[in-house]
Image: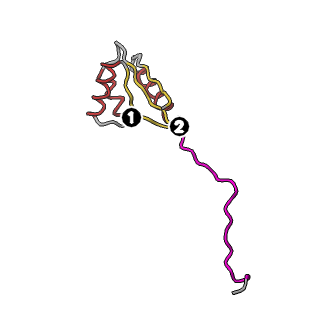
Amino acid sequence: MTDRYKPEIQKEADTETLLEEPPLYKVLLHNDDYTTMEFVVELLVSVFYKSFEEATRIMLNVHRSGIGVCGTYTYEIAETKVETVHELASQRGFPLKCSMEKV
């Protein structure tokens, strides 16, 4: 077999492209003395897509511990969820605080 019939072998690039996972952020709800438990459960179901049972568990954790994790998301999604919580709480007259924290 002559060299002209050998299949060409692709050479690997000298540099590898490293794909990093985007950093994740926890979205947190903070307890206050004014926001109702029912509203918090409603938010957890509608904004964070939690089941009623899981939403109730998170709400009780917020109530007892002062803070609770709603979920973990990429930066843009976490930021949007925090803004959505603040908008909905403001529309209903609640001072509910929601924040995000890098994991």
Q: CA distance from mark 2 to mark 1?
A: 19 Å
Label 1 belongs to which residue?
48
Q: Which residue is mark 2?
A: 23
Judge by depth and name the residue closer to the eye, 59 or 2: 2
Expressed as whole percent of the image width and height from the top left, the position of residue 17 reads 63, 51
Mark 2 / mark 1, whichever is N-terminal: 2
Q: Tell which tag, 2 or 1, sits nearer the viewer.
A: 2
Q: From this view, report whether residue 94 is shown above or below residue 55.
A: above
- Farthest front residue in view: 1
Number of on-image labels: 2
Residue furthest to the bottom: 1
Q: Which residues are magenta?
A: 3-22
Kind of element beneath mark 2 = loop
The amino acid at mark 2 is Pro
Predominant SS along the magenta part? loop
Residue 6 visible? The answer is yes
Q: Residue at x 67, y 71 (%)?
A: 9
Query: In the image, is 7 to the left or to the right of 98?
Result: right
Residue 31: in magenta span: no
Res 55 quadrant in image: top left
Amino acid at circle 1? Phe
Q: Residue 21 in the image: x percent, y percent?
A: 53, 43
Query: Is residue 21 depicted above or below 52 in this figure?
Result: below
Q: Quadrant of residue 88?
A: top left
Where is residue 65 shown, x and y percent of the image?
33, 19
Query: Is 83 displayed left or right of 64 in the figure?
Result: right
Q: Indicate yes or no whether the magenta region holds residue 12.
A: yes
Q: CB of mark 2 within 8 Å of CB of mark 1? A: no
Q: Residue at x 70, y 56 (%)?
A: 14
> Where, quadrant-wise, is the N terminus in this rendering?
bottom right
Asked whether residue 38 is in view, the answer is no
